[in-house]
Every structure is written in C-alpha cells, then in structure tokens.
Amino acid sequence: MGFFVMMRCDSIGLMLLLCVFGVWVLPTKSAGGEGFSKNSSFSLPSSVNVGALFTYDSFIGRAAKPAFLAAIEEINLDQSILRGTKLNIVFQDSNCSGFIGTMGVLQLMENKVVAAIGPQSSGIGHIISHLANELHVPLLSFAATDPTLSSLQFPYFLRTTQNDNFQMKAIADFVSYCRWREVVAIFVDNEYGRNGVSVLGDALAKKRAKISYKAALTPGADNSSISSLLASVNLMESRIFVVHVNPDSGLNIFSVAKSLGMMGSGYVWITTDWLLTALDSMEPLDAKTMGLLQGVVAFRHYTPESEKKRTFKEKWENFRSKKRSRSDDGFNSYALYAYDSVWLVARALDFFFSQGNTVTFSHDPNLSNTNDSNIKLSALDVFNEGERFLQAILEINYTGLTGKIEFDSEKDRMNPAYDILNIKSTGPQRVGYWSNYTGFSVVPPETLYSKPSNTSAKNQRLNEIIWPGEVSKPPRGWVFPDNGKPLKIGVPNRVSYKNYVSKDKNPLGVKGYCIDIFEAAIQLLPYPVPRTYILYGDGKKNPSYDNLISEVAGNSFDVAVGDVTIITNRTKFVDFTQPFMESGLVVVAPVKGAKSSPWSFLKPFTIEMWAVTGALFLFVGAVIWILEHRFNEEFRGPPRRQIITVFWREHSEHAWELTSRIEGMDTLITSNEPIGVQDGSFAWKYLVSELNIAPSRIIQLKDEEEYLSALQRGPRGGGVAAIVDELPYIKALLSNSNCKFRTVGQEFTRTGWGFAFQRDSPLAVDMSTAMLQLSEEGKLEKIRQKWLTYDHECTMQISDTENYQISVQSFWGLFLICGIVWFIALTLFCWKVFWQYHRLRPEVIDEERTSEEAGSSRPGRSLRAASFKDLIKVVDKREAEIKEMLREKSSKKLKASQSSADNSQSKHSETP
C-alpha cells in the first residue's frame, strides 16, 4: 500500500517502469572505467559516470557511438578540463523498444550517473523523463525532437539537437513561399510523428494554410499497408505530401509511391530531417535510390562548416568498426550532436566543480518505502546536486561542431537553422537555408546574425528546385480530386431578372449570364472539373443569398455561382473569385417631365452668383473698351455701336428637363416614406444595419412587375417612394419601364459580383486567373452582349439643378485673380495715357485755343477748366495719331533748337 501511496503523484509510465525493475536485469557495458561510488569529501572525484542510451542498430545509433567514444577519449586526454577527474560513459541499447529502453535507463541510473545522454526515441524520452525528474539527473537528448518534451513538464529534460517545433515552422514557411494552401501529412503513428504533425498544423494555420488530411502509418508498416494508405491519399485534392517518419523504414514509402505513379510531374514531396539522416548514412549513394527520390525536397539540421568538423569526421572514421559488414553505417548529423553532448557535460562538470560543488548521491525516501516488496528500488539514488548541475549545463555557452551551444528559456538551442536540399539523380543538392532569424536565404545563416532580422517576403530567396518529373516550374500543388465526387455548385433559383441565372431544361439544368461566364472559365482550366448544378430556393421567391453563402461555408456546396455580391461580411466565410460584374446600390424614383420656363437659364447659378457675374460683366466690358478703344476699330465710332460691341453675347437655349422630389439616399433617410428592395438581396440588411432605417419602412418586392407597380402607385397608393437595388438590376428595370424612372443621387456602395468558393479553395485562384483571361480576350463582353442587351437604353441619372447651383464661394479665387490682372492692366494703361498727355499738353492747349478763336461762342474760356476735356481727347485719339503728334513735337523741338543755335552764332559774328 505504501508503494502506491508514494507513486500517487507520478505518471503511469513511471509506475510501470519501477514495478518491473525488480524482475528485469539487462547487461551493462561501460567505456572509460569502473562505476563511481559516492564521494563525501570536497575533493574532486577521481571519476564521474555519464550514461548513453540509444538504439545501436539504427542509422542514428551507428553514427552516434563512434562520436561518443571519440569525445570521451579527447576529454580524458585534455588536461585543461576536469583537472584529473576521469569521465566514464555507460552505454545502454534501447533496441528500438520503449519497454527495453525504459529498463535500460534504470540500469544506467544504478551506475550513479550525473547525466544521461539520450534517448534517440521521443517515445522513450516521455517515459524516462519522469525518472530523471525523480532522481534529479539531467537528461540530454541528442536525437529526440518531439516538441511536446517541454521544460515545464520535464524540468530535467534538455535537448542538445533542434526542436521539431522549428523544423515544422520551416516547412510551413516553405509551403507559404511556394504559395500552396493545403498539404497531406504522412507520419508514423507514435509520439514523434503525431506531435510533430500537430505542430505543423499550427504553423501552417499561421500562414493561412492547413493539413487537409493526416495519414498515419503504424511503426514498421509493411509495403501492403503503405500502398493502401498512399492509394487513399492519391484520391484527394492536395498533391503536397509532407513525410515525417523514422529514417530506418521511411524509404519504403517512396518505393511504393513510385509503383503507384506518385513520383511524377505535379506531385510535391517534402520530408523532415529523417531522409537526409538515411541518405547521409549510405555509402555510396546508389543511382537507383537517387532516381527514386528525384525531385524530393528534404530538410536537415544545419551545422556550420569548420576545420574542427572536418578533423572530427576523420577521427570518427577511426572509431568506427574496422570490419564493416554494411553500407548504411555512414556519418550523419546526429554524430555531431552526440559528440557535442558529451563535451557539454564535460564543460558543465568543469564549471560545476570550479564553483566548489561535489558529487553526492542519497537514497530516495519514497523509493525506500518499497523495501517490504519484492521490487527492489533502493539501488536507485538521487543525485543531490542535480539541480545545481542542471543549472551549470544551462549556463554553458561555447561553439561546438554543431554551432553555438546556448539555450533559451525553454531549454531549446538558440538560433535554430536547417539546410534545404533538393534530391537529384546525382545526389542531394543544397538550394538554400532556413533560420528562425532570417527565414530563407542562399547564404549560411551565421553570416546574417550580425545583421538586423528581416523575414519579409521580398527578402526570402532559394535557388532553383527541380521537382518530380524533372520540371523547374513549381507545381500547382493540387488537382481536382479523383474520388468520383463532382463539384457541388449552388445556384440561386431566381424568380426575377432571370437573364442572370435561372432554371432550364438543358443538360446543365441552369442557364444565364452568370452560368455562361462560369462555364467559359471552367473550359480554360488545365484539368477537368466534373460538376453538378444544384438549384437553391423554392422558386416562389428569390432565395436569401446570405443563406446560400452559409451553405457554402458549411460544406453543403463547394461553390455558389450566380449574381452573388462580394461584401465584407461574406468574405469572412468564403473566398470570392475576381469580380466579373461591377455593381453597387442606387436609388430609383419616379420622374416627371417639365418644359423649361423662360427663366430656366437662371438655374445653374444662385442669385448672388448672378449678381456678381452681372457686375463683373459690366466691369470687364469697361476694361476691354478702355484697352481696345485706341487700337481696335470695332471699339470706335458712334456710342451705340461701341456699347453693342462691348455687351454682345451669344444666347443659349435649354430643352426639356427631368425632375424628381427624391434627390438621393439622404432624402430617403430623412423621410418616413416606404422604400422597396429586392427579395433576397443584401440591400435590406444594409439599409437597416448601416443606414439605421426602420425595418417597417422597407418593403421586399419579388419581381419587376412589383417594382413597377410599387413605383407607379407611390406612397399614397400603397407603393413606395423609391427603390434601392443593385445597378445591374436597375439597368434592366429602367429599360423594361420604357425609361419612366431614373436613378437619383449618387451610387452609394461600390462592389461587384463573383463566384463564392469554400475558404482556401485553390480552385478559386485558378478560376480568377481564367476570368481575367476571358476579360483580356474580350469574351466577357461578348457574353454580356448576349444576355444583357436591352431594347431601350435609358439615361441612368437625372440632372439635379438645385443640388448643383454654383455660388460666389465657388469662384471667389478666380474673381480675385482676374481683378488683380485687370487692375495691373488699367494702371499701366493710365500711366501711359498720363505720360502722353503730359508731353502733348502744350499742343493740345494750342489746338484748343485755335479752335476757340475760330468758332467758339464763349471766348475767354479758362485753359485749366478745359484740362479734363483735353485729357479725354488724348484718351479718345487713336494710338497712331498720338505717336504722330509726338514725332511732330520732337521734330519741332529739334528745328527750334537748331534755329536758336544759328541765331546765337549770327549774333556772335556781328559783334565787333
């Protein structure tokens, strides 16, 4: 009873492994020395034991063991580390068995190890991590990549390799980089496979992609089971396969896939690091295997190249068995992680001892309570300083063969990175790298760590990849599923505007403008699409289009085809194609004809605008007369003629106008009159939700006859004041009404019609591309002319003169500019006139005097009183006359000057 009380807080896995410990004994093999006993003094121990648990006969195990031996030899020969303390390593073979692996770790713990390196299996890691927690022994795994081996649940678990959380993030980034939306995950059905694929699904979701199907393989599945599974996934839509299995049996998947024709053009195969682990271990790579894997993209843990790494490979070869009996025990990246794990323990021990710590063990009182039982657990001791030693390991920071060894808060390696390789007939070829710091690049990740992180899409780059079938263009990644299920197309069963879509007796069962566009686009796809049209609605009234969209989102239909409006709320549930028809809500109201009154010409401007325009008209006429009078003969002559010239304008005529008391949507909102909308349209929800119009005011109308009747009767006759509907319908309505109605105001929503597919459907993208091609080739216009050509083409909108009257405010800037220009022109003109008047003034006065002496009735008139009249005469004279007068005056002055000079000279000569 005491035993079960003691175990109440532990997992079932730990209970089972402790229960069987007393009756199961495995042989233990030690390398480097004998077991270590407790040291109660503060002096450094003469030796320390470290355990190593892995499967000997595996790709990883065959590469890891020589690495362990090489590391132990180097450490024990290096006098600068551990200062005389010998490091022993105790090996245990887990033999690919969870049960045997559990027993193996119990054997390790009997040897009072200060740390256990391993296991390589994630499943065993989950079990023995409970034991590590209990005995306070750090567990350093160089190969268990399961993301769920977390530091929270297992504080003594430490991963010296990369966490699959990052590898799955890298694969999700690759799927996004290639613009794929769905993948099929093929995985081994154990902790390693299931948990890795679960993390992949989360990573894909962040990229708006998903796992469309999870295909689980039993560990060690035979070819028959693999064939059945691959045959089932081959019937599905996605052609992107992500394979996450064990390296020792994974190659069988590709041999079966090859036999099923799944390694050809159009397929994409992506593998996690297991494939390169297997290929790197094969020496040499045979052409048959490379041909089988041609086009596969594989990820591998990235380890930087260095001279130390090349030297280690040579030493590793020396430790490998001299009698090689197989060709698949070659070097792979896990040898590097195993080597670095041993050195990490050694460096941590050196630091641990330098802090004055020692190594002691004590009995676990919980385990001692089982002495009365046949199960002897007293051999398992607790490492007293285990927590401090774990902290010492976490504080170590150095550069090993696998790169910089440093741990984050989750006990994961810092700066995770992966090689991306493309398998070709000549072998794997690197096409780039992925790192958690910069994403994809074609240069080694460590060269980018000194630069700012940049994971933007434009900064992502990989070299060319040759895909299965030896094609360089990235595959589309999906096909229409070959499972005998046609595409289910939901079509609204309309009762109005049937030229857009309606029921028919043809083989398709439907017809209309929208159907012809969909069929034309389907014909452009590079693959066949079996399909069936299913009418949605009872045929008595137009169905609710929101409900139709919900049916698509709920998987009742694969796509909705018809006059489906693209609005924001619907895009949350489905993916729309490229719009094939522009649309938007407009207001239709009755109009009446009114003959123009004699004063219709006044309507474009307000009264104030007309007043200012009239004043400006007079002012401009005066300025033009002043500036042109002296030069232009048309501005001379009798006063009547000059006035006509200044104020003459051409008349304008106005014809009939259309008017409506409804001026637009604003008028409807402020009124309380009923508004008509089409049954099933989104207009009802828009008016209520967006414009806050009372639902009681909105009347749903079934067809064109009800539209026309409601408009003609009006609000007083039980009809409506106006109708709010989409523009394509209104064009048909106006034509059918012989243009008795018009739209008023402006179009107040702008949208379009498209086909609605289920979210993330790749068919939506291909259909959009096809519809763009139809538009570029002019085929969309031909389909429109076939279905949407009307006998009466009506002018859509009436003129709204009151709403478009122009006021003074609209032109004050223009008036200001014109005024400044005219002021400058008049100023220059006046200055020129006064200058000419000043020079001509004596002649003008003499002319005036001569005129008065000749015929004036009032002689003796004052010259000063006549000065203004003289100025007007100068202004009224032609410019040519003024110039002639100025030339004559200049000539007279010259002659007078010469005469004066001659007289002066004559007088001088007569003087004695």
Image (cartoon, rainbow, N blue to C red):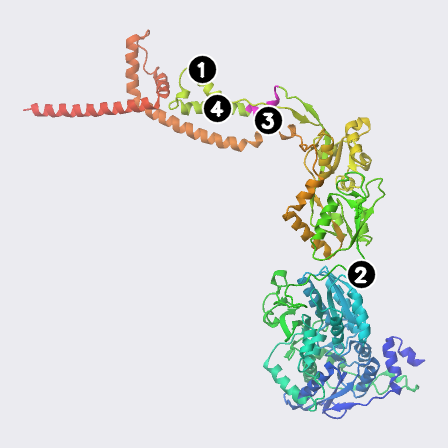
Label 3 vs label 4: CA separation? 19 Å
Whichever of labels 3 and 4 marks the residue nearer the N terminus, that label is 3
Can you name the residue that lies furthest to the top here? 857
Residue 860 rendering spot, x and y as whole percentages: 30, 10
Asked if the residues shown at circle 3 and circle 1 are in contact, with their CB atoms under 8 angstroms apart, the answer is no
Q: Is residue 811 above or below residue 750?
A: above
**Disc 4 designates what residue?**
619
Disc nearest the viewer among 4 and 2: 2
Q: Is residue 216 above or below residue 77?
A: above
**Disc 1 designates what residue?**
640
Which residue is nearer to you in this view: 45 or 418?
A: 418
Which residue is nearer to you in this view: 862 or 64?
A: 64
Residue 68 rendering spot, x and y as whole percentages: 70, 86
Instruction: Give the magenta range.
Output: 598-611
**Dot 1, how many residues are within 10 Å of its Cα: few (below 14), some (14-19), or many (20+)?**
few
Is residue 415 visible in the rendered image? The answer is no
Which residue is nearer to you in this view: 573 or 375?
A: 573
Residue 613 rendering spot, x and y as whole percentages: 54, 25
Amino acid found under the numbered disc labelled 2: Asn
Disc nearest the viewer among 4 and 1: 1
Checking the image for residue 605, the label placed there is 3
Name the element at disc 2: loop
Left or right of residue 89, residue 304 in this image: left
Whichever of labels 2 and 3 marks the residue nearer the N terminus, that label is 2
Name the element at disc 1: helix
